């Protein structure tokens, strides 16, 4: 278990906190491209790492992310007009460009140069892989652009969604590196969900309920191996990469698309759960994309017009006790994503880790916490930049593989854990 001060360290991400400063050293998913699709279109309110901001695509197509509030009287610029290369506050007409620079104050003479003195906080945005990414750290420490494979393949090979999750980012991420719960919580979905069923690996998950975890460090984070018994003298390995601070990948199943997540803090009690699917060597089929849009696999159905899951705490996640009793769904909640989210949200806004009783299958979680605390302290106390910011650290894959019992997974799956363009992923 963690002491209270350790739990505070790993869960608090507002400005000036050690973990908040660590997050600000990375490119983070901020918006889907569809949210700012049209030049001169509607602005979007965005809160990340407890900072309230406004995103917009100006009339020239340039992306901007600036402080949400006008420097004059504090009005939210979400009410503003997106016009002629900037956003204009509707209260008194002050106008700002995509860099937060004030470019017009109608009440002041242009010759006075008053505009030049007014600048809102702003952060750079880049668009890649159907995602608009943000960097919120020091300009002189900006890392290279994201190199995660799903964001570099053609758009026809990938699909991305996001959903609101009403809990701290870390308890959501810890579910993403915990393969032991698959044999229980998701057991009813493995052979019925169109994006999961048909894999031989599912049978190993269902037949061995006591996986053994082995964790090895990677340059950018960890490789977390869950080992289950297979035929003869073999083990079935499901290997989950975690790249600092909040990227995880789910081990693949058959020729289904590979999927994974980012868990990005909104504030200390809410996060965005980003979910991607992609295939490294082929386009996604129409049936696969439609299933994702329908909330299958790791995606969800929404309350129309929002990114809030249709199943949520206000309706008890549409829990079906009859389906639970019949074994159709182990927890009574439909859908893999909401099976996870419902239990993670049930822990409370911020899980009290001082009350835990961890076991050997929690080794991955223990190591994630250790590396996060170590990196946050190194940055805060010594100015050492965290791992996982360089492109090579991000070119990772999850793996599902059968190996001889005497072969360590890091050795037997070494090449498979590295993403290489045009190379098929290793799966069974």
Image (tube, rainbow, N blue to C red):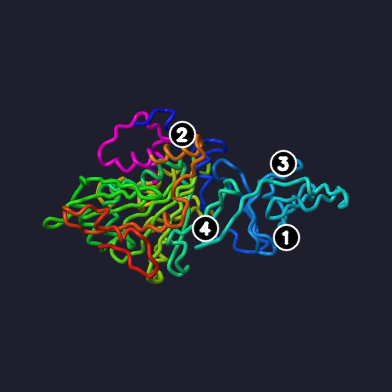
* CB under 8 Å between discs 1 and 2: no
Q: Earlier in the sequence, mark 3 or mark 1?
A: 3
- Point out residue 9 in the picture as x, y percentages from the top left corner: 46, 34
The residues bearing labels 3 and 1 have C-alpha atoms spaced at a distance of 21 Å
Upstream in sequence: badge 1 or badge 2:
2
Mark drawn on residue 85: 1
Task: Measure the C-alpha gap from mark 4 to mark 1.
Answer: 25 Å
What is the residue that sits farthest to the left in this orientation? 232
State the residue in front, 403 or 304: 403
* Mark 4, residue position: 145
Spatial CA span between label 3 and label 4:
33 Å
* Residues in magenta, as a range: 341-370
Residue 171 placement: quadrant: top left
**Residue denoted by label 2:** 9
Mark whose residue sits in front, 3 or 4: 4
Image-based side of 198 in relation to 44, left or right:
left
Badge 1 marks a residue whose secondary structure is loop
Residue 322: tell me if it is visible.
no
Q: Residue 261 location, x and y as percent?
A: 42, 53
């Amino acid at each position: 278990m963690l002491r209270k001060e350790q739990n505070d360290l790993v869960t608090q991400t507002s400005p000036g906190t050690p973990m908040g400063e660590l997050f600000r050293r990375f490119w983070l998913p901020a918006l889907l491209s569809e949210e700012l699709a049209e030049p001169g279109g509607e602005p979007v309110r965005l809160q990340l790492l407890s900072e309230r901001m406004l995103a917009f695509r100006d009339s020239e197509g340039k992306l901007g992310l600036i402080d949400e509030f006008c420097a004059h009287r504090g009005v939210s610029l979400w009410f503003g007009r997106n016009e002629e290369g900037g956003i204009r506050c509707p209260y008194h007409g002050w106008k700002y460009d995509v860099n937060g620079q004030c470019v017009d104050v109608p009440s002041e003479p242009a010759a006075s140069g008053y505009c030049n003195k007014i600048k809102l906080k702003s952060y750079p945005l880049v668009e890649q892989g159907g995602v608009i990414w943000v960097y919120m750290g020091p300009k002189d420490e900006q890392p290279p652009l994201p190199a995660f494979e799903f964001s570099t393949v053609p758009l026809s090979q990938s699909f991305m969604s996001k959903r609101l999750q009403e809990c701290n980012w870390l308890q959501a991420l810890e579910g993403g590196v915990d393969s032991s719960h698959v044999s229980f919580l998701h057991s009813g979905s493995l052979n019925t969900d169109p994006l999961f069923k048909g894999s031989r690996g599912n049978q190993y998950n269902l037949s061995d309920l006591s996986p053994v975890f082995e964790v090895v460090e990677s340059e950018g984070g960890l490789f977390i191996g869950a080992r289950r018994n297979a035929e003869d003298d073999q083990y079935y390995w499901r290997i989950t990469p975690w790249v600092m601070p909040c990227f995880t990948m789910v081990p693949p199943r058959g020729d289904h698309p590979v999927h994974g997540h980012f868990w990005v803090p909104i504030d200390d009690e809410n996060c965005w759960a980003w979910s991607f699917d992609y295939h490294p060597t082929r386009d996604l089929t129409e049936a696969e994309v439609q299933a994702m849009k329908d909330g299958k696999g790791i995606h969800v159905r929404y309350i129309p017009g929002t990114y809030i899951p249709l199943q949520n705490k206000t309706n008890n996640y549409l829990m079906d006790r009859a389906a639970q009793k019949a074994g159709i769904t182990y927890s009574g909640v439909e859908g893999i994503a909401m099976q996870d989210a419902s239990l993670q949200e049930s822990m409370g806004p911020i899980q009290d880790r001082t009350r835990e009783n961890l076991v050997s299958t929690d080794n991955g979680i223990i190591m994630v916490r250790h590396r996060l605390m170590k990196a946050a302290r190194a940055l805060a106390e010594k100015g050492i930049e965290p791992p996982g910011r360089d492109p090579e650290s991000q070119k990772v894959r999850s793996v599902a593989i059968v190996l001889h019992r005497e072969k360590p997974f890091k050795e037997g799956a070494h090449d498979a854990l590295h993403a290489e363009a045009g190379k098929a992923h290793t799966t069974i």
